[in-house]
Image (cartoon, helix red, strand yellow):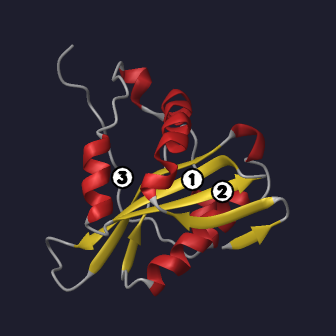
Amino acid sequence: MQQIRDFKIQREDFNEVKDQVDELTHKNWEDTGLSKYGIKLNPDWDIYETLNKSYMLGVYTVRKQNNLVGYLTVVSREHHHYKNTVFASNDILFIEKEHRKGLLGYFLVKYAVKDLKDLGADVLLFSSNIDKPYDSILQRLDFQPHEKIFIKKLGD
């Protein structure tokens, strides 16, 4: 756990925070998700539960006075191209709009980087939405650009 001013950053168990994360997931979808492509949010919580039971899901939270104001989820596993290398990949990074100024996102990612390294991850992959980029946070933490992702909706 790390305390930054009024905020507490920590890794939490998925089962303990699922309902709170669900609320923020909807805010994230409205803010940066695929809503602009007409894709409706419908999280498959069973998959998250399976990942959690398999020790592949990491949930990092930011709390202010015990209220969840942000979170980062990552999935970690041996890579199918690099069998002896554990890759962690971010799933969602979201912080409530009123808490995005300053270095809170930086400290959340930095905390997760250290924790994932301590847990045995070798590589952390991060994607950033082009409409709400946080490249400066990642570059400050020595992440390097590697790929671009393109999207095309197929069908109606």
Q: Residues within 10 Å of mark 2 (few under 14, many from 20)?
A: many
Q: Residue at x 72, y 52 (%)?
A: 66
Q: Amino acid at mark 2?
A: Val
142 over 131 or under it: above or below = below
The residue closer to the viewer here, 19 or 123, is 19
38 over 89 or under it: above or below = above
Q: Residue at x 52, y 44 (%)?
A: 21
The residue closer to the viewer here, 44 or 35, is 44
Report if residue 92 is visible in the image. Answer: yes
Q: CA distance from mark 1 to mark 2?
A: 6 Å
Q: Are marks 3 and 1 in contact (CB under 8 Å)?
A: no
Mark 1 and mark 2 lie on one chain; the one further toward the N terminus is 2
Q: Position of residue 61 (x, y in %)?
A: 59, 58
Q: Residue furthest top?
A: 156
Q: Which residue is mark 2?
A: 62
Q: Which residue is mark 3?
A: 148
